[in-house]
Image (tube, helix red, strand yellow):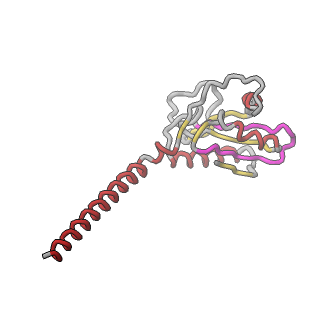
Amino acid sequence: MSNTKSANRKMSKLWILKRIATSLFGLWLMVSFVFYWAQEYFLIEAEKNPSGYPERAKDPSGFSEMQKLEPSYNRFVSPRIGLLPESKELDPSIPVAINFQKFDSPSQPPRGKLFYLHGNRGSIERCRFEIKPFLDAGYDVWTMDYRGFGNSKGKLSEINLLADAQMVYKEILKREEIDIVWGR
């Protein structure tokens, strides 16, 4: 009789362990499913272009100097239309407009041309501190904002990030050769 009770207890403990393991696996599966379907929400943080940053007096990081960094070329391109006419205001009827800019190196002639992709957060305004070392090293820098970032318009997604980078790269190549593609 005691063998039967002992066997029943072992079976009961084993049943409980199986139940816990199944529950934990189900929970892990649900969390994984949510992260898979919502990964763009969690990983890509678009930033609309701020109107500007206030001047900071005696900033040791040099941020004020970077704020004054102005592009020599600032245009928009659209997948269906191509290069858009220069305008202060974007036409609201254009659903996708990608902003791209060129910053010239202070040393002329430049050592080369660089296409800088700022990654899945921020905007051109926020990445100026990242391109400043390239400018100081003598490179002209092209950069862009993906759809939904900065002044660019359109729906944000991973596929669109890649398409935007390729579209702007092709548009830049119509003007000049790129020596380095640098991305975060």
User: In the image as oriented, which residue stretches furthest toward the right?
Assistant: 108
Nearer to the camera, 80 or 117: 117
Residue sitting at x 76%, y 52%: 179
Q: Quadrant of residue 145?
A: top right
Quarter holding the N terminus is bottom left
Q: Is residue 32 above or below residue 59?
A: below
Residue 110: horizontal and vertical position, in percent? Answer: 84, 44
Nearer to the camera, 55 or 170: 55
Residue sitting at x 72%, y 29%: 67
Residue sitting at x 63%, y 31%: 85
Residue 160: horizontal and vertical position, in percent? Answer: 52, 45
Nearer to the camera, 115 or 79: 115
Q: Is residue 75 left or right of residue 81?
A: right
Residue 176: horizontal and vertical position, in percent? Answer: 75, 46
Residue 162: horizontal and vertical position, in percent? Answer: 56, 49
Q: Is residue 32 left or right of residue 114?
A: left
Q: Is residue 5 left or right of residue 128?
A: left
The residues colored magenta run: 98-119
Residue sitting at x 87%, y 40%: 108
